[in-house]
Image (tube, rainbow, N blue to C red):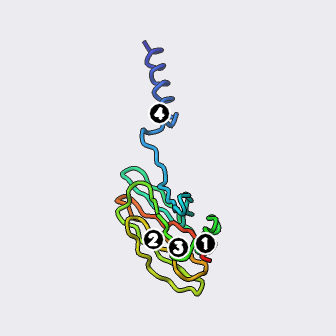
Amino acid sequence: MKKIILLLLIITILAGCTGIASNTTYKQAQGTVILNDQEYTMAVGEFEWQEEDFQFRKISNAEIHEQTEEFDTLQGEQGGKLKIKIDQNPSSISIHQLSEDHSRAIVELKDNEMTLPRKAGYYIYEVNVVWDHGRATYLFDVSIE
């Protein structure tokens, strides 16, 4: 009898130490830009997500220009259209455009589509996304000729 209890105790301890994964696994939401029917994954600037028993945070200390180095600059047309696609159904999306002259403007997004500038130049876009359980900043850049 003692051997059975000892065996059960050892099995219980070993089962508790195996680190059995929970049924829920988290996958970071991905943001993509669609230009000329091609999808490009945006660089992630910052990201926070919190649920009942899970928290994830990515904070970046790099300058916005350094962060866009992770993204291959898109070649866009003056006044062209660009589509934004974000995973996990965000509650809001806002976009800021940074120009070469360091000016900053809010970009209108209608049906997840935006219009590129009519002026040639280099532009960085900061896409701020909010969900019920988190927020993120995605980045991409476009060269307009």
**Regarding mark 2 in the picture, which secondary structure is present there?**
strand
Percent position of residue 97, x then y = 50, 78
Q: CA distance from mark 2 to mark 4?
A: 52 Å
Residue to which mark 2 is pinned: 114
Question: Do callouts 1 and 2 mark residues in contact (Cβ within 8 Å)?
Answer: no
The quarter in which the C terminus is drawn is bottom right
Circles 4 and 3: CB distance less than 8 Å? Answer: no
Choose mark 1 or mark 2, whichever is in front.
2
Upstream in sequence: badge 4 or badge 3: 4
Q: Residue at x 61, y 72 (%)?
A: 62
Q: Which residue is mark 1?
A: 62
Give the amino acid type for the residue marked by disc 4 in the picture: Gly
Sequence-first tag of 1 and 2: 1
Category of crowding for the residue at label 2, using alpha-carbon neighbours closer than 10 angstroms: few (below 14), some (14–19), many (at least 20): some
Residue at the disc numbered 4: 16
* Secondary structure of residue under mark 1: loop
Task: Kindly report the distance in space between the C-alpha atoms of the residues bearing marks 3 and 2.
Answer: 11 Å
Q: Earlier in the sequence, mark 1 or mark 4?
A: 4
Image coords of residue 18 (percent x, y):
52, 33
Separation (CA) of disc 1 from disc 3: 16 Å
Disc on res. 125: 3
**Amino acid found under the numbered disc labelled 1:** Ala
The reply to whether the C-beta atoms of the residues labelled 2 and 4 are less than 8 Å apart is no
Of all residues, the one furthest to the top in this rendering is 1
